[in-house]
Image (cartoon, helix red, strand yellow):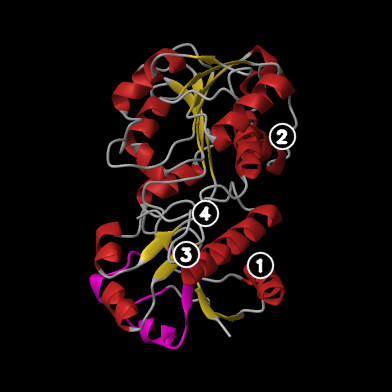
Amino acid sequence: MTKIKLMGVREEDEHYIEMWSQQHEVEVDMSKEQLTEDNVQSIEGFDGLSLSQTLPLSETIYNKLNQLGIRQIAQRSAGFDGYNLELASKYGLIISNVPSYSPRSIAEFTVTQAINIVRHFNHIQRKMRLHDFRWEASILSQSIKDLKVAVIGTGHIGGIVAQIFSEGYLCDVVAYDPFPSEHVKPYVTYKQSINEAIKEADIVTIHMPSTQYNNYLFNENMFQMFKKGAVFVNCARGSLVDTKDLLSAIEQGQIKGAALDTYEYEIGVYTTDRSEEGLNDPLLEELITREDIIVTPHIAFYTEEAIKHLIFDALDATMEVLNTGTTELRVN
């Protein structure tokens, strides 16, 4: 019987792993640990490997996996930033990801957080905790339908965000994408550049992958091109945003507030419990304590539907490699 090792398994994953295992009559072994040089030997005897890896893999690990006869790693996420694809190929490892597992979950969360910022949710909650129930100018808001929304990146997620704002809230939606989608065109007016899309928008939400070419794309210069008082939403990748520049733009009043589900230094912090040892990250501390910023730990995707798709698609890709030598989801 085929045997697959899954690492980085969370409690909520187990039900869907067992469901997939029973449906496919494949033996699975689950571990909560991340793959490291210290535990890589535990992969011995398995045919396939699936990870939810946030820590980068060393060349020693790639080499050892090759020696153990492993020919693939199925990453259970869309992002695969932590993998060195050249090293993986050098040691005969096919890396796969799950590029689209619940775009609607992420889109719904994006819209929710944008509205929370517009409606001063953090400030209202603080007032409620202080038993201050007054109506005052600091919590006065705008109707969402009167706002212009800029969606930067109109793939699976951005396209649904555009649709929700357009059909659900009757917003005027503009967008930028180097490859405009015919499916999204009914909901947006495409612009020729990011600058053109953001300059009149009340809400700017970004939906693009992280690449070597767009690191800190949203920096001081970009924020100065925003409409004064705009809201910024990042449920994409932390590396797209220079956090210090974003804070400066908010301090200056150039940006009204932000909703951030990703953070440039989140690796090694998000998904962990730091309630006892603390953060040791003044930048993240400032983000969390501000009323004009909503910070969440990369959970926009985090629904039952998404977990099932992540598990099933990753394990299906594993079997595809074992049976055919490749998979449509490979990234190297």
- Disc 2 residue type (three-letter): Asp
Residue identified by numbered label 3: 74
Whether residue 4 is visible, yes or no, is yes
Residue identified by numbered label 4: 98
Residue 266 vs residue 20, the one in the foreground:
20
Choose top left, top right, bottom left or bottom right for residue 65: bottom left
Between label 4 and label 1, give the one nearer the viewer. 4
Secondary structure under badge 2?
A: loop
Q: Earlier in the sequence, mark 2 or mark 1?
A: 1
Residue identified by numbered label 1: 12
Q: Earlier in the sequence, mark 4 or mark 1?
A: 1
Magenta-highlighted residues: 35-60
- Disc 4 residue type (three-letter): Val
Choose top left, top right, bottom left or bottom right for residue 125: top right
- Disc 3 residue type (three-letter): Ala
Badge 2 crowding class, 10 Å Cα cut-off, few under 14, some 14 to 19, many 20 or more, is few
Q: Position of residue 187 (x, y in %)?
A: 63, 19
Please determine whether, in this image, residue 201 is positioned above or below residue 102: above
Badge 4 crowding class, 10 Å Cα cut-off, few under 14, some 14 to 19, many 20 or more, is many
- Is mark 4 in CB contact (under 8 Å) with mark 2? no
Residue depicted at x 64% and y 53%: 306
Residue depicted at x 47% and y 45%: 262
Q: Is residue 113 magenta?
A: no
